[in-house]
Amino acid sequence: MGSALETLCGQAVGAGQLDMLGIYMQRSWVILSTTSFFLMFFYIFATPLLKLIGQTTEISEAAGTFAVWMIPQLFAYAFMFPQAKFLQAQSKMAAMAVIGAAALVLHTVFSWLLMLKLGWGLVGAAVVLNSTWWLIVVAQMFLETWYFMALILFAGYLKNAEVAVDGLSICMNILGWTIMVALGFNAAISVRVSNELGAARPRTAKFSVVVATMTSMLVGLAMALVLIIARKQYPDLFSSSTQVKQLVYSLTTMLGISIVINSLQPTLSGVAIGAGWQAYVAYVNIGCYYFFGIPLGLVLGYATSMGVTGIWDGMLAGTVLQTCILLWMIYRTNWNKEVSNNMNSAF
């Protein structure tokens, strides 16, 4: 929902309509805060909801406790995302980088202190995450994330669920770290495309798309290669369980492929956001993820003997399909026409 601000603010900057930036951001705060209020009830009742869909009592209660403590972070998102888009549209990346670096350092220190030193466990993790995100909100004044977290949810129904959940959690955390790099490309290209379209420079917008796409692909390949080379060593950093480490090792190839695809896909989504295609992309995401990827993953994971690998294969297929559709949309785009369309829709 917050991605609409990227289009509006980016085009406002490109067209010199700076007086609209604050208005757009304030409207976004109201909309996202209201949305967060209604989403809060899913956090409050997470434990019974997870039990209702068949998760184990142990996993449901742990996740439910964590979810309740994460409610402040939900409202932090409502303020942080609009602020980030507001600054990105004006290319004020240095301030965001400094704030992010400071938050990362504090996050690391307090994670160690609360989770390990004081033994707060999941509650400590929630407190640290809440504090970190609100720090970013104060200082500055993830559909796809749900999709891959569903992998871990479905793994809870497999045989030997604890090993499956632990192994997938490690892989998803690593994938999440690499996606942070891709989200940088997402933010950069969405701002650049919206600025160039707002300034009526279609050729520059098209060139920026090509450069960002190629660069993000190369960065993803480099990260995947490092992981595959170190596939025998890196599982030791996350677990002492032989079963978990063996599962992570066996999933490394799939993880590498996912890193490459998920380095490219956010960049393409950024192009779509910058051009104001959020509605079309929403339909593509829902179709590829929830009507194709998840059902295919469930069939491969449960109806065959593939297990965790099958679930991941199916869901990755959804991401690949989405990426191909976005590539086709961008390839077929008439950028001169987009200049007039986006200017008319924004103003």
Image: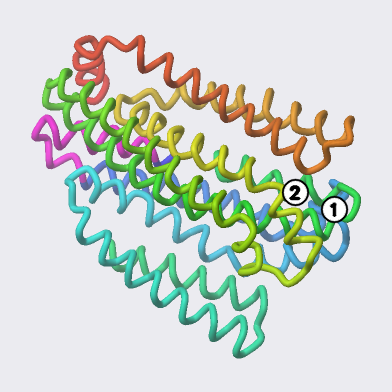
Q: Nearer the viewer, residue 315 or 61?
A: 315
Give the residue pinned by disc 1. 55
Q: Please indicate, yes or no, whether residue 168 appears anywhere in the rendered image.
A: yes
Residue pointed to by mark 2: 153
Q: Residue at x 81, y 61 (%)?
A: 243
Magenta stretch? 3-21
Does residue 7 belong to the magenta stretch? yes
Residue occupying the point 78% across, 45% down: 154
Are the residues tagged 1 and 2 within 8 Å (C-beta)? yes
Question: In this orientation, which residue lies closer to the viewer: 215 or 179?
Answer: 215
Whether residue 141 is visible: no
Residue 37 placed where, x, y %? 55, 53
Q: Secondary structure at mark 2?
A: helix
Which callout, 1 or 2, points at the residue further toward the start of the chain?
A: 1
Q: Residue 7's spot in the image, x, y percent?
A: 29, 32
Q: Give me the residue at 53% from left, 78% from top.
A: 111
Q: Amino acid at mark 2?
A: Leu
Q: Quadrant of the C terminus?
A: top left
- Corner quadrant of residue 104: bottom left
Q: Is residue 153 left or right of residue 18?
A: right
Q: How many marks?
A: 2
Q: What amino acid is labelled 1 in the image?
A: Gln
